[in-house]
Image: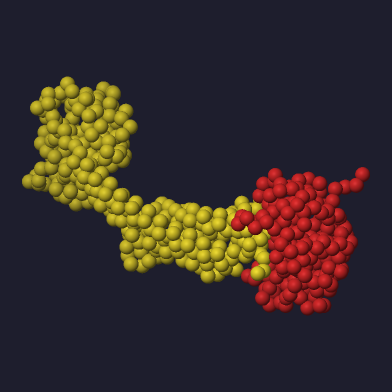
Amino acid sequence: MRIVAQILRESALSARSQPVTSLLTVVMVAGMCVAVLLTTGRNVAAETAVLGQLDAAGTRSIVVRADTTANITTAILGHLDAVDAIDEAIGFGPVTDARNAAISEGDAVPVRTAYGRFGGAALESGARDDTALASTAGAEALGLVDGTGGIITAGGRSLTVTGGLAVPDHAAFLEPLVIVPASLSMRGGPNSGEPLTVLVVLVDQPHNVSTVADVIMGLLADTDPSRVTVETSGQLADLRAAVGGELDTYGRTTVLGILAISAFLVAINLFGLVVLRRKDFGRRRALGATQGLIVVLLLSQVWLLSVVGATLGTALTVVMLAANGQESPGLDFTLAVGIAAVLTAIVAALAPAVAAACRDPLHELRVP
Amino acid sequence: MTSAPPLSAVELGFSYPNGVQVITGWTSTFPAGSMTALTGPSGSGKSTLLYVLGLMQRHQTGDLLLHGRPVAGLSDAERARLRAHQFGFVFQDAALDPTRSVLDNVVETALYRRQSRKAAVSNAHTLLERFGVALRASHRPGEISGGQAQRIALCRALLAQPRIILADEPTGNLDPASRDLVVAALRKQAEQGSCVIIATHDPLVAQACHRHVALDGQQCA
């Protein structure tokens, strides 16, 4: 431990005693971080935004529509529960029109019984079986002033809308939406055979859509195909993969290019240092420094300087982006760039460090 | 039973990679407590011999024995560690790091010996005091005279109380007073049991030594 502290101390003192080389190294590493974050970092932010928009368009969803005679029931939700690649699945029963109980001539809005997970949460039945939830659009269509109130179905069943419902993008096609939530515990129980007319499945990753679609098709194998339609977002998923791939390739190429140029500049700068201070390295060798120690001293010196450079570079870029109101590439990417910059500088310092360690004391110390 | 001398050479031979033979079949023993002057004209191989004896260059033929043990088969790292622990070096131009303080220069070798810096700094202050340059501890080498620089180089060489001290023209750039001080310090070190070898052109320095080895012409023989 003491030797590590001594090496770091010696490296820090050496860095301080060579201000021009040290400053150049810090500036180069900082510049590396700024260049990567301002080019690829902004690409990452743009990529995240583009892919986010594609995802919002439903790249991960599968929609199954069936008529009431197709005999698709809530039992299918039990099977889908066992599929790891599914984030959530919700089934909707047959539609019944409903109107505001207080407005006899109000617009009719479809009401569905809903089973499963919706918007990341499991649906639970209300305390009574006449409880309903309405989306903002659903409540407006029903004329519910504060989003709650009584409604009545075409069959004369009275329901009470007790609260709002956030409709995720992949279920937006069901708007205006009013549901009667049915508890998950109903599945496998006495009501497990409740009919479904719409099944919405959200897959965890776009590239898993086709696999999950195949699973669903398998579960529907006994169903009359003319009574069921399955809509997948396969094309959107393909588009997402293509867009993501193109942006990744461009970003990777840019990052590698910047790192390579920076590494070259750092190496040139350090080779300059080794040439200028060859007598210093020769003296160290003569006085008993091993070649390994000289390599470690130079690398730790570069490590210290590159940590300073990476910290300054990333901090400066984040401040610049924030000041201009531009999106930051994110903490993970920023940290990764900083670490990559430090590693690049250390790798670039290897050859100069070895050159320094190989200085011949006889050649360097003899006075002509 | 007598202990092996700190340094001895048997039929030592060395040539540069370009083929120039500098040392041929050279045999000598450097006992503990002795101060030896290596003299000879320029190009006779004094400095080269000193660097070979100091394990900075590898001899090609013969044997070099450190405390009776041959060093020919040692790795570069082992030779470096021996230099750090067993040898003290004084170079013609002091060879101080101009970017570091006098104190940092003196304690530089502590890192190579993995010695505590605190202990090294304490020893360094004692040595700087002894050689009259304690007030210069925080100065840079550029701010001191040549004589003071050589005394500081001597402090660096003596920091670890080495068994062998090699000095290459240590008084070459010094005024008589500084020269006398450096020579006296080296002689005192020899009297305390170290083996001191000095390559020099200065007859006064050679006279101050216990032994005198003359190298002739193109080869030391």
Residue A154 visible, this orientation: yes
Q: Which chain is yellow?
A: A
Q: Is residue A42 above or below residue A190?
A: below
Front residue of this view, candidates A188 and A158: A188
Front residue of this view, candidates B175 and A356: B175
Please say which color scheme the image uses: by chain
Which image quarter is the C terminus of chain B in?
bottom right
Q: Is residue A14 above or below residue A175?
A: below
Q: Judge from the rendering whether residue A45 lies leftward or rightward of residue A364; answer left or right.
A: left
Q: Quadrant of residue B172?
A: bottom right
Front residue of this view, candidates B213 and A348: B213
On the image, the x and y values in percent for residue A63 come to 19, 36
Residue visible at 70% across and 72% down? B138
Q: Quadrant of residue A86?
A: top left
Which image quarter is the N terminus of chain B in?
top right
Q: Is residue B2 above or below residue A342?
A: above
Q: Colour of chain B?
A: red
On the image, the x and y values in percent for residue A365 come to 66, 65
Residue visible at 33% across and 67% down? A324
Front residue of this view, candidates B74 and A233: B74
On the image, the x and y values in percent for residue A118 come to 27, 39
On the image, the x and y values in percent for residue B130 come to 83, 70
Furthest residue in direction left, as rendered: A105
